[in-house]
Amino acid sequence: MKWRKLGKIFDPTQHKLANGCVEYAQSPQALVFDDYVRIYFSTRRKDPANGKYFSHISFVDMSADLAEIISVSSHTVIELGALGCFDEHGIFPLNVLKNGSEVYGYIGGWNRRVSVSVDTSIGLAVSRDNGATFKRTGDGPVLTSSLKEPFLVGDPFVTIFNKKFHMWYIFGLAWKKFSENQPPERIYKIGQAVSADGITWQKKEEGRQIIADRIGVEESQALPTVAYFNGCYHMFFCYRESFDFRTNKRRSYRIGYACSDDLINWTRNDPVAGIDVSEGSWDSDMICYPHVFHCREKVYLLYNGNEFGRFGFGLAVLEQI
């Protein structure tokens, strides 16, 4: 594939965000309307009591050609989870999907732990005002850990194919200490679930890793996104080494690719993705958290760059397959 990068299109530090958030615009997710595109992202607020972050959801409305910012949300889009709930400390990402007159928002919720840093599950919220605000269907998750997927179920991407809801998500395989002087790091892979109504989900072959590893069994895979065009299902995701990845650009996130004819069996072929880091730019060290969508007969790719999206997200348009 040949993508034309359109540059960084949104920088959270240049706007006043709700909930006291000042940096990060991670995991951009598009909701396309007739005359504009709403892009949701996960931003952060630091707790002054302990210096730890909370992740909140905001959005930016852009013109239909994605060339101009119309407005940025200044209100709370969705409240964080209640005390002790799976999304008490943050939401990353909020994946959105039109379903009739409503908008379903799939919550990548996280909460802090003691022996390891975090655990995650997936919840559901519904909007009845075109995605301006969301209310949970309940305090618990719709997809979470299970016998063969014991932790770190998150990063939902949901779409409808052939009148059935399909979800791709990640699940944890292990927490591992790679160094005695560092806390444990996580290893996670991509799985799949299906649903008739978008609420009750069934995992497809629980614990089955559907995307083959490229850099070894300790590869971590994140944020799958799937689109159908040119007679094939295309999945984009990001992958990295599971340790020494935060500041070592050779071990940090890159974009992976796989294709499928049946939504079950996936063939990985990363060079086909056609997009990588740039030299001396905002995405020179890493490229991560992809989201593919259609708008006005074009295929676009939203993504984050250096420092996991601390200073915003960029856009690319597909020019050639």
Image (cartoon, grey):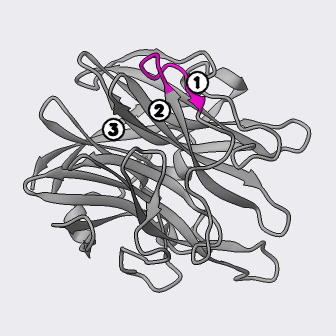
Marks 2 and 1 in Cβ contact (< 8 Å):
yes
**In the structure shown, which secondary structural element does the residue marked by tag 3 occupy?**
strand
- Vertical position of residue 307 compared to residue 148: above or below: above
**Residue drawn 63% across the image and 21% down it:** 76
Tell me residue 36's x, y (percent). Answer: 30, 19
Residue wearing tag 3? 7
Q: Nearer the viewer, mark 3 or mark 1?
A: 1
Residue wearing tag 2? 40
Residue wearing tag 1? 77
Q: Nearer the viewer, mark 2 or mark 1?
A: 1
- Vertical position of residue 173 compared to residue 195: above or below: below
Res. 166 image quadrant: bottom left
**Residue drawn 24% across the image and 62% down it:** 273
**Residue drawn 46% across the image and 55% down it:** 201
**Residue drawn 43% across the image and 77% down it:** 209
For the residue pair 9 and 62, the one nearer the viewer reads as: 62
**With 80 as the anchor, is 284 left or right in this view?**
left
**In the structure shown, which secondary structural element does the residue marked by tag 1 occupy?**
loop
Range shown magenta: 127-136
Tell me residue 196's x, y (percent). Answer: 36, 49
